[in-house]
Image (spheres, grey):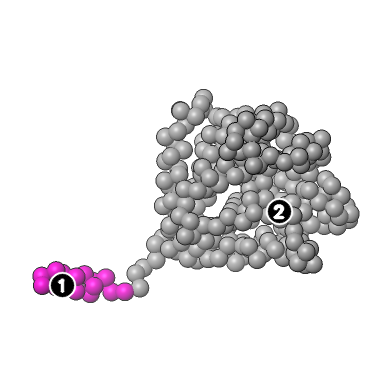
Amino acid sequence: MNYQKRFRVKLGSNVKLSHMDPAFTGNHKNHKQAADEIEHYRQRLWDLQELLYADHRRSLLICLQGMDAGGKDGTINHVLGAMNPQGCRVVGFKQPSAEELSHDFLWRVHRAAPRQGEVVIFNRSHYEDVLIARVHNLVPPKVWSLRYDAINAFEHELMNSGVHIIKLFLHISKAEQLKRFHQRLDDPAKQWKISEADYQERPFWNKYTAAYEDALSRCSTADAPWYVIPSNHKWFRNLAVARIVVEHLESMKMKFPKPAVDIQHIRKEYHAAAKD
């Protein structure tokens, strides 16, 4: 199965998340059955990210979006954490600062875009400006409704400068979200994540769903496709994300650059030194 094709939002489609099963696991029945494959793709990520860093002509931007408790942090830790941190950076987008609010909504995002040879992971992203801004009426509809075209143009500009973009929506059910909230209550290592806002946002589930459906439908482009990742099962989420990123990096046909020094000359000097 080609995971890019399986989970990619088709151009011009009208996304309905209710038609997409968040508990889908394909041919895998459980984590144990998928463990070796997950590890294989984690190792492959390490190799391909090193190649991207060495090639130093292009870069990769990975946008992670999802409902609260959808697994953004887990995806970064378990999958994308397999990459060398020397060439990989995570940027979290929370409530904008006073300085950021004094600029256009994409200003803070453009500043965080990856350099050549770098992988940057957005934990939330510029899509918050057509999600939370829309759901909570932070700006009028005439403002956020224009942002879809601005986002598409921005992402197209990044692509023209050598930035490859993968956008991942981590799709969980409302029941799974509540289950994860309750698990946090019982896990001392996760209690710090609990906030009243988590539960206060649940009544807005349908509004967030509608906002996500519009963003996925209107902003999945040839330049920067959206992928809807079934994420009720964390292990399958990890497998799907790893495979999609690997498939995309492999499609870039990267090669290690030629050495900048005379290898034969250095080899002769090495052998000469070894004889002394």
Residue type of the residue flagged with mark 1: Ala
The x and y percentages for residue 100 are: 75, 64
Quadrant, the C terminus: bottom left
* Residue lying at the far front of the rendered structure: 188
Residue 22 shows in this picture: no
Q: Does the magenta stretch include residue 140?
A: no
Q: Residue 6's quadrant in the figure?
A: top right
Residue 128 in percent (x, y) is at 74, 51
Query: Where's residue 253, x and y in %?
Result: 46, 56
Count numbered badges in the picture: 2
Mark 2 residue crowding within 10 angstroms, few (<14) / some (14–19) / many (20+): few
Relative placement, left or right, of 261 versus 94 is: left
Who comes first in sequence, dot 1 or dot 2?
A: 2
Q: What residue do we see at 49% from left, 60% from top?
A: 87
Reading the image, the residue beneath label 1 is 273
Residue tagged 2: 94
Task: State the extent of the magenta-drawn residues as a range.
Answer: 261-276
User: Is residue 265 part of the magenta span, yes or no?
Assistant: yes
Residue 226: x and y in percent read 65, 47
Picture layout, residue 133 above or below residue 1:
below
| Left or right of residue 54: residue 96 | right
